[in-house]
Image (tube, grey):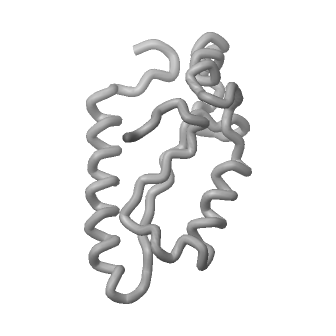
């Protein structure tokens, strides 16, 4: 593997497992008026996730893949967490919330 590559099979399996676990957790907690959601971030700058292993080319490609043409920030994630913890999100549960600037969309 080259710098900052993750084995696709293991990564995909981990994401699928987390989404499945979250759906079950939402069903279990729902009757108690509790919600369970997962935040799936895209490329977020100023974090330790890549630990300096991200090449300039890979960084540029990740940003180019977004619809808004910018990297995510920790504040983007914090804002999503704040919303999900607010009363405004009380009917949102069992979801995987993509915070990725539109790099990967769902239908």
Front one among 25 and 6: 25
> Residue at 26% of width from left, 68% of height from top?
24
> Which quadrant of the figure has residue 23?
bottom left
Return the x and y of residue 18 as percentages of the image width and height.
Answer: 33, 53
Dividing the image into 4 quarters, which one contains the C terminus?
Answer: top left
Return the x and y of residue 71 as percentages of the image width and height.
Answer: 68, 31
Q: Determine whether 43 is above or below 56 in the image.
A: below
Q: Determine whether 83 is above or below 51 in the image.
A: below
> Residue at 45% of width from left, 22% of height from top?
5
> Which quadrant of the figure has residue 28?
bottom left
Return the x and y of residue 90 as percentages of the image width and height.
Answer: 51, 76
Return the x and y of residue 55 as percentages of the image width and height.
Answer: 62, 15
> Residue at 62% of width from left, 32% of height from top?
51
Dividing the image into 4 quarters, which one contains the N terminus?
Answer: top left
Front one among 61 and 51: 61
| Residue at the limit of the structure toward the front, as seen here | 107
Q: Determine whether 4 is above or below 38 in the image.
A: above
Q: Horizontal placement of 31 versus 58: left or right?
A: left
Front one among 73 and 7: 73
> Residue at 61% of width from left, 62% of height from top?
81
Q: Horizontal placement of 40 versus 30: left or right?
A: right
Q: How many marks?
A: 0
């Amino acid at each position: 593997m080259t710098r900052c590559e993750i084995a696709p099979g293991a990564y995909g399996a981990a994401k699928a497992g987390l989404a499945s676990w979250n759906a079950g957790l939402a069903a279990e907690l729902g009757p108690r008026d509790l919600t369970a959601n997962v935040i799936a971030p895209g490329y977020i700058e100023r974090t330790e996730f890549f630990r300096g292993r991200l090449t300039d080319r890979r960084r540029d490609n990740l940003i180019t893949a977004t619809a808004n043409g910018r990297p995510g920030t920790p504040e983007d994630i914090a804002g999503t967490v704040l919303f999900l913890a607010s009363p405004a999100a009380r009917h949102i549960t069992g979801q995987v919330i993509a915070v990725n600037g539109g790099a990967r969309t769902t239908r």
